[in-house]
Structure formats: structure tokens, C-alpha cells
Amino acid sequence: LHDKRIPAPADMIYFGGGYPENFAGQLSKNRLMIEQIQSYHAQGIHIYGECGGFMYLCNSLIDAEQQTHSMVGIFPFKTLMNQRLRSLGYRQVTLQKKCLLGPKGAILHGHEFHYSKIETELLSQSSGEIALLYKLDNNSHEGYSVGSAIGSYVHLHFGNDSNVITHMYNQLG
């Protein structure tokens, strides 16, 4: 909310879950941080955002009062807050392509808990390559990549399989 820079050097930036809707105005106004994140992405630095972190990395966030706040803009989505829970449960994730998290076909585990949804209407206007990364055990698809960035509503449990951390480390090295 208040930092202007990401500590350097950074091999990867991780944005965990949280409640960006509660601080959307402050996040949106911190243009120096947004510009630095965009610059790191343009340089190919790995960026991983899950749930609230993913929402922050999208184009905009529309809060419960229907106010629109600009966010980082790596993912060409709007996130919209709902009054009711949108998704809750444990998830088994199968990677649909090789990425920072593992090889194609790797099975990861995590959970979802969120009140927002994404609108993909801006997807067709995206100038960058965007890929769908996850197939979930409930037959839905989730997780996106744009260049060196990965974003998803799923909170992955890295402790479930140490190969994920090993794969990430090898990709960063």
C-alpha cells in the first residue's frame, strides 16, 4: 500500500491472497509500485499472484459499491465483487502446459475461497499472449499466464509436493 519499490534484485514476485477490495483505492493510487511491477513483467521477471494477488494483477477491480479501481493490468480482466461467496473448496489442479509451477500434466493441490469473479471481455482485446493453465478436478478451467506472469484464484499448497518448489527454483536459477 505504501511501498514505492520492490526490493532489488528480485528473481520472482509473489502476490498472495488477501482482500484487495478493502484497499482498492490505495492500491490504485500507488502508481510508482504499479509501474515497477509492470516494468518487472516487461523484463521477464516471474510474477505469481493467487486470489487477491491475482485480482491486483488484473486490469481493474470493481468493488461492492460499484466503484472501478485501476490495478496493475498484466491480466486483461476486470474483477467484480459479489455479496455472496462465489467459490469455496479444495481443488486438484492439472497443469495444461509447462510453466513456473511444473511440467505439463503435473498435479497440484490447493483451495478456492473468493467473493469476486473475473470478466474476460477484455481478453479479445489483449495484445499479449494469454494461456489457460489449469484444469480443475471439478471439470472447470482456471489459472492464466501472460508472459512471465501466472495468476489464479486457486491458493496452491506448495507443501503437498516438494517437486513444485524444486521446479520453481530450477526455473529461477
Image: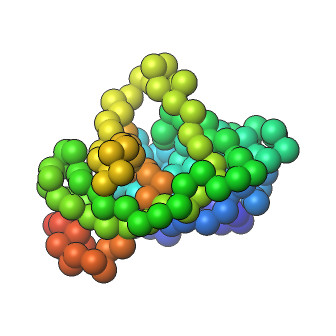
Colour scheme shown: rainbow
The image shows a total of numbered marks equal to 0
| Residue ranking furthest to the front | 138
Of residue 20 and residue 135, the one placed in the foreground of this image is 135
Query: Residue at point 76% right, 60% down?
Result: 22
Of residue 133 and residue 137, the one placed in the foreground of this image is 137
Where residue 120 sits in the image (x, y, percent)?
52, 30
Q: Is residue 141 placed above or below 114 in the rendered structure?
A: above
Query: Residue 129's quadrant in the figure?
Result: top left
Query: Residue at point 76% right, 38% down?
Result: 68
Viewed as shown, does residue 160 lie left or right of 48? Answer: left
Check the picture and name the quadrant holding the N terminus.
bottom right
Of residue 98 and residue 9, the one placed in the foreground of this image is 98
Confirm whether residue 56 shows in the render: no
Check the picture and name the quadrant holding the C terminus.
bottom left
Query: Residue 164's quadrant in the figure?
Result: bottom left
Where residue 114 sits in the image (x, y, percent)?
59, 57
Query: Residue at point 67% right, 62% down?
Result: 19
Viewed as shown, does residue 25 lie left or right of 72? Answer: right
Where residue 95 sits in the image (x, y, percent)?
23, 51
Confirm whether residue 118 shows in the render: yes
Query: Residue at point 17% right, 59% down?
Result: 106
| Residue ranking furthest to the top | 125
Q: Is residue 33 placed above or below 118 in the rendered structure?
A: below
| Residue ranking furthest to the right | 65
Viewed as shown, does residue 67 lie left or right of 100? Answer: right
